[in-house]
Image (spheres, helix red, strand yellow):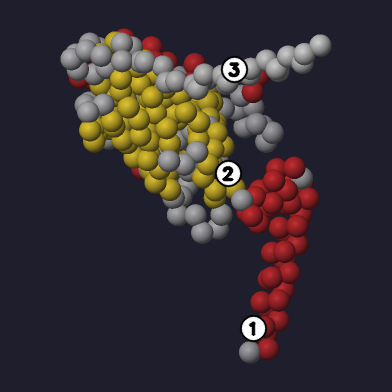
Amino acid sequence: MQDLPPPAVVAPAPEQSVDTAAELRVAAALTEARVQVDSSFRGANIVLYGAVFNPTEDPTDVVVVVRGPDEPIRLVKKTRNMGVWLNSRPVLFEGAPGFYMTASTRPLPDIAGFGQLRRLGVGVDHLRIDAPEESRTVTRYGVRDVVISRLGEDYLDWRRAVIRLKEAAALYNTDPEGVSFVDRGLFRAQVELPATAPTGEYHAEVWLFRDGAPAGVSNLTLTVEKVGFERDVYEFAHRRPWTYGILCVLLAAGMGYAASRVFRRN
């Protein structure tokens, strides 16, 4: 009986790129997806770059939105009562982003209408800031906050105050010409994180607009995290706040005692 040769092994066909020339879409990426924060951190500049695949000659616009982790904000206002300046009852905003920036090829009102921007939450004027639950309006010290749903006509003034304070701290930024095309279809934008940027997970949205309507979006994630000794202290303070507080008091008392002994000798 004659042995038959082994069957031929057919090699799989090499993967080929998919033709996207007929599809309008946007693709983007970050030069850094993770930012490490330590004692020497002075901020970070990250480049967001991408490409627009446009099979037609119709012009398009690109809008970049970067939103940091949400955090509660408590505001007070100085009020004069019987000739004495006092703090008003705190107003609590919950869910305001700790960092927010927009960059675009043109001013946002020239790219899309008010309704589209409000629906997408694009721009500081359209930020979604959540109100806290009624049951959470009293702090552990018995101070009752004013929830934003009860502010009435004063709501917009307090909301503008939140944005104004964040802009003064370089945590909110709007750049109407922050997205530039470096070549046909290729664009870039600069994401500047200040030294006070909160840690956590950031979400970046790259919107593609055509004729005033969104035509595509690319979602990215950026992580800002503490490293080294600062991270150990941060995690210890959050895991065991009472122990951390007691240690801080003992450390301050020890340093004060040591300083008094040194100056007494002098």
Give the percent coordinates (x, y) of residue 230.
63, 54
Q: Find out whether the residues at labels 3 and 2 contact each other: C-beta distance under 8 Å.
A: no
Crowding at dot 3, Cα within 10 Å, few <14 / some 14-19 / many 20+, comes out as: few
Residue 175 drawn at (x, y percent): 28, 34
The CA span between labels 3 and 1 is 86 Å
Q: Which residue is mark 2?
A: 225
Residue 77 visible in the snapshot = no
Residue at image coords 65%, 56%: 229
Q: Disc 1 marks which amino acid?
A: Phe
Circle 1/circle 2 CB separation < 8 Å: no
Task: Give SS at disc 3.
Answer: loop
The three-letter code of the residue at mark 3 reads Val
Q: Which residue is mark 1?
A: 263
Sooner in the amino-acid sequence: mark 3 or mark 2: 3
Q: Position of residue 5 (x, y in %)?
A: 70, 17
What whole-number distance in Å separates the C-alpha atoms at marks 3 and 2? 48 Å
Q: Which residue is mark 3?
A: 10
Instruction: Name the image quarter holding the N terminus.
Output: top right
Q: Earlier in the sequence, mark 1 or mark 2?
A: 2
Q: Going by the picture, which residue comes out furthest to the bottom? A: 266
Rendering quarter of residue 188: top left
Residue appearing at x 37%, y 15% in the figure: 19
Question: CB under 8 Å between callouts 3 and 1?
Answer: no
